[in-house]
Image (cartoon, rainbow, N blue to C red):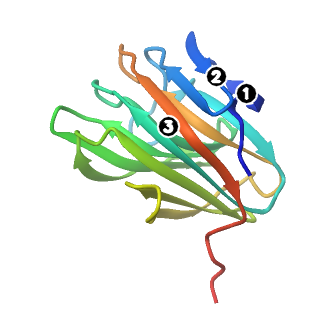
Amino acid sequence: MNFKPTEAVWLNPPQTCVIEEDRATITTDPETDFWQRTYYGFQHDNAHLLYWATDEPYFSFTVKAEFNSSALFDQCGLAIYQDSDHWAKAGIEYHDRDTAWLGSVVTNRGYSDWATTDIGARVTCMWYRLSRRGSDYCFEHSADGLQFKQMRIFHLFEADREVRFGLFACSPSRHSFQAVFTELRMTECLWTAHP
């Protein structure tokens, strides 16, 4: 099943975007981010999120993200968002000309965590997959859209019935970049049950 960006809903719409039947192009506004409390103490809840809602308890959603980020913490990818205290995101965050972080954040009960792995800053394209089994979730990534590797398995409170999931992009610094999302697919759950 294909999901159309034209059928999605905005949380924190950007000033500039192009939404088509088969792609979404987001130009981030400066000083946008998702983060809650942990370590830094600050609370940011204004990242751009183009999302769909479903109460389907078992599914996988895949998207290809291409981007041209060039400032610290520029990021884009996949997210599931219930409210400001319960959400998760997976994507690539730019660090400098040599380094970017492939990472994820899960926020439960108002506190965020952050898990990263260093990758080269020359990476400007990645596929992401979010899979759901009830209120448990799995983020995966792929360099070619065929072979996916697990990023993390997590539980999300307040996400056991209808969930909101979709495409996110943000620029926590005073910067802006463009992210292009294509190849959106909703399928049966590809994250197999534990035996």
Residue furthest to the left? 98
For image coordinates 58% across by 28% down, the residue present is: 24
Read off the residue under disc 3. Answer: 37
- Visible residue check, residue 136: yes
Tag count: 3
- Visible residue check, residue 114: no
- Going from the N terminus, do you reach mark 1 or mark 2 first? 1
Mark 1 vs mark 3, CA separation in Å: 33 Å
Q: As shown in the figure, which amino acid type bears the numbered disc 3?
A: Arg
Is there a contact, CB below 8 Å, between mark 1 and mark 2? yes
Q: As shown in the figure, which amino acid type bears the numbered disc 1?
A: Thr
In screen coordinates, is 161 left or right of 23? right
Q: Quadrant of the C terminus?
A: bottom right
Mark 1 vs mark 2, CA separation in Å: 6 Å
Read off the residue under disc 1. Answer: 6
Q: Based on the displayed image, in which of its 4 quarters is residue 51 positioned?
A: top right
Residue furthest to the bottom? 195
- Going from the N terminus, do you reach mark 3 or mark 2 first? 2
Is there a contact, CB below 8 Å, between mark 1 and mark 3? no
Read off the residue under disc 2. Answer: 19
Q: Position of residue 80 (x, y in %)?
A: 64, 45
Count neighbours of disc 3 (C-alpha within 10 A) and say few if under 14, some if 14 to 19, many if 20 or more: some
